[in-house]
């Protein structure tokens, strides 16, 4: 089978592979830039995507947002324009050709200054688009992403060149097929901007009981308008969004801070332990204690395997 990768695409693969030598998610010295490597397909993982550009140099992945599924691979990019809780899964990766990707977070405050320079042929952006979309990577955007990664080899150039490359990346996105999503974030009274404010409030207060009327007042929307536009943009209701945040935080508390299921559920806002266990199992496929125990055993096995390989070497 002939490899259709261009020299630039191969450089993207080589750069990510060099800065992500081991499986996992790797922050870099450039703020907001991370690189990712996985040598095999895996189980589903839950997390949160911030406004960002994610592109895959090798392999493929799927992201589940509510009932929506976004699949993308080499030559594609995923644009996220609002904070979204998601479930992800690597669907194409091998030890010989591992999954390799990069994510660059977008500073939404920098969008407005570029909108007037990004012609859109007088087309008005859609009023309430989903906060996530997959598109084909253009040569211009790929070139900017490659130059961003090259900066990791020249840290002295970062202060001068990073703002220019960041500006170019935002500009390329504003002139691409997903322009409407970013443009809406730059309009202070747009539905997207209001829903973003609601999402920020929910992330900061996920453990509190959700009162829809109060949330609607906070973002200057009617209750019906909040429900309609929130689901249009996030693919879930405010209640479902809060539930995702609670379950993700509870799992983190159990795995990283060693809390038991009862304490974790209570800390994230659940008054009923049975409800917490039921919703957790629906989200992660098994009850809290069993899921966390399995993940811990998997980590121990991986670490033990690494130690054995070192001793054999």
Image (tube, rainbow, N blue to C red):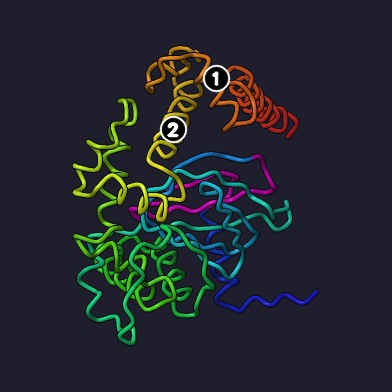
Q: Is residue 37 magenta?
A: yes
Q: Is residue 50 magenta?
A: no
> Count the marks: how many?
2
How packed mark 1 is, by other alpha carbons closer than 10 Å (few <14, some 14-19, many 20 or more), is many
Name the quadrant of the C terminus: top right
Q: Is residue 80 left or right of residue 299?
A: left
- Magenta part of the protein: which range? 20-43
Q: In the depicted view, which residue is nearer to us: 1 or 47?
A: 47
> How far separated are the C-alphas under marks 2 and 1?
12 Å
Q: Nearer the viewer, residue 246 or 166?
A: 246
Q: Quadrant of residue 153?
A: bottom left
Q: Provide residue 196's location: percent of width, then percent of height.
A: 29, 51
* Left or right: residue 289 compared with residue 117: right
Height in image: 191 above or below 180? above
* Residue at 37 percent of width and 18 percent of height: 267
Give the answer, above or below, for where 44 lies relative to 155.
above
Q: What is the x, y in percent for residue 69?
A: 58, 54
Using the image, tell me which numbered label, if any, was put on residue 277: 1
Q: Secondary structure at mark 1?
A: helix
Q: Quadrant of the N terminus?
A: bottom right
Which residue corresponds to the image point at 31% horizontal and 48% vertical from the top-left? 226
Q: Is residue 157 left or right of residue 133?
A: left
Q: Residues within 10 Å of mark 2 (few under 14, many from 20)?
A: many
Q: Position of residue 143 (x, y in %)?
A: 46, 76
Q: Nearer the viewer, residue 264 or 215?
A: 215
Q: Which residue is mark 2?
A: 243
Please name the residue shown 54% across and 26% down the image. Answer: 280
Residue under the image location 51 percent in, 19 percent down: 275
Image coordinates for residue 200, horizontal then vertical, percent:
28, 43
For label 2, the SS is helix
Is 134 in front, or is 281?
281
């Amino acid at each position: 089978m002939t490899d259709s990768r261009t020299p630039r695409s191969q450089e993207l693969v080589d750069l990510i592979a060099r800065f992500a030598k081991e499986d996992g998610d790797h922050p870099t010295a450039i703020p907001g830039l991370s690189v990712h490597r996985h040598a095999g397909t895996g189980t589903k993982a839950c997390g949160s995507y911030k406004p960002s550009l994610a592109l895959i140099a090798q392999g493929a992945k799927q992201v589940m947002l509510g009932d929506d599924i976004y699949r993308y691979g080499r030559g594609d990019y995923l644009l996220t324009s609002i904070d979204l809780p998601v479930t992800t899964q690597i669907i194409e990766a091998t030890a010989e050709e591992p999954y390799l990707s990069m994510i660059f977070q977008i500073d939404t405050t920098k969008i407005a200054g570029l909108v007037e320079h990004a012609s859109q042929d007088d087309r008005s952006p859609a009023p309430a688009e989903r906060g996530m979309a997959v598109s084909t990577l253009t040569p211009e955007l790929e070139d900017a992403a490659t130059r961003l990664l090259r900066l990791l080899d020249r840290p002295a150039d970062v202060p001068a060149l990073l703002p220019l490359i960041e500006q170019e990346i935002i500009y390329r996105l504003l002139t691409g097929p997903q322009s409407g999503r970013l443009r809406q974030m730059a309009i202070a009274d747009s539905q997207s901007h209001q829903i973003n404010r609601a999402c920020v409030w929910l992330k900061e207060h996920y453990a509190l009981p959700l009162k829809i009327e109060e949330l609607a007042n906070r973002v200057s929307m009617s209750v019906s308008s909040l429900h309609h536009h929130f689901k249009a943009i996030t693919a879930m209701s405010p209640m479902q969004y809060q539930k995702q945040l609670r379950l993700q935080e509870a799992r983190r508390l159990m795995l990283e801070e060693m809390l038991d299921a009862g304490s974790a559920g209570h800390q994230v806002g659940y008054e009923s332990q049975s409800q917490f266990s039921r919703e957790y199992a629906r989200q992660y496929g098994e009850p809290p204690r069993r899921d966390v125990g399995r993940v811990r055993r998997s980590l121990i096995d991986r670490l033990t395997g690494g130690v054995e390989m070192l001793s054999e070497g």
